[in-house]
């Protein structure tokens, strides 16, 4: 079994910063992509940032230059540093990972439970 647990969400004023973290645990042999998604009320879930095991990264155009994704392949963690936050960044942020589980013996997609980020004055 594999679990992803996010932390670091909260309420911040426009222009402020937050750092989200996600820790993967369980019967993990390897993790390929680690991804942050977000879903605002009434909207579809969207990809925010993605990082490969090689640490190559991709970002949504709306967050380029403001958000930075990073990972620790030893600790099986991924972080999202969010700067210059805007009200439109308000959403539930989800961690997603492509994991090879020792127990399952194959690659599977796992999700965290989500963490709320609210940007408001």
Image (spheres, helix red, strand yellow):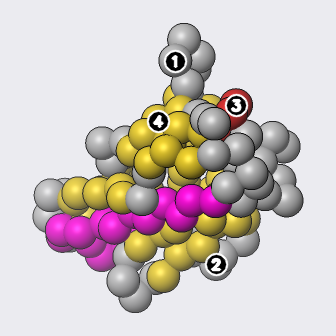
Q: CA distance from mark 2 to mark 4?
A: 27 Å
Q: Which residue is mark 2?
A: 54
Range shown magenta: 17-34
Spot occupied by residue 21 in the image (x, y as percentages of width and height) = 44, 65
Q: Which residue is mark 4?
A: 92
Between circles 3 and 2, the one closer to the viewer is 3
Q: Please name whichever residue, 121 or 75, is drawn nearer the observer in this view of the structure.
A: 121
Q: Are marks 1 and 2 in contact (CB under 8 Å)?
A: no
Q: Which residue is mark 1?
A: 41
Decide whether the magenta segment is chiefly helix, strand or loop: strand
Q: Under tag 1, what secondary structure?
A: loop
Between circles 2 and 4, the one closer to the viewer is 4
Question: Does 113 appear above or below 30?
Answer: above
* Residue 4's disc number: none
Q: Earlier in the sequence, mark 4 or mark 1?
A: 1
Q: Which residue is mark 3?
A: 88
Q: CA distance from mark 3 to mark 1?
A: 11 Å
Residue furthest to the top: 42
Tell me if residue 29 is in the magenta stretch: yes
Q: CA distance from mark 4 to mark 3?
A: 12 Å
Q: Are marks 3 and 2 in contact (CB under 8 Å)?
A: no
């Amino acid at each position: 079994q594999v679990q992803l647990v996010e932390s670091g969400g909260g309420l911040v004023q426009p222009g402020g910063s937050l750092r989200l973290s996600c820790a993967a645990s369980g019967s993990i042999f390897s993790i390929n992509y680690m991804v942050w998604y977000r879903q605002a009320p009434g909207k579809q879930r969207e990809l925010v940032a993605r990082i490969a095991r090689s640490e190559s990264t991709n970002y949504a155009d709306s967050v380029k230059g403001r958000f930075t994704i990073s990972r620790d392949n030893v600790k099986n963690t991924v972080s999202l540093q969010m700067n210059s936050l805007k009200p439109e960044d308000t959403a539930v942020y989800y961690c997603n990972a492509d994991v090879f589980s020792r127990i399952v013996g194959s690659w599977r997609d796992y999700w965290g439970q989500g963490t709320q980020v609210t940007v408001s004055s």
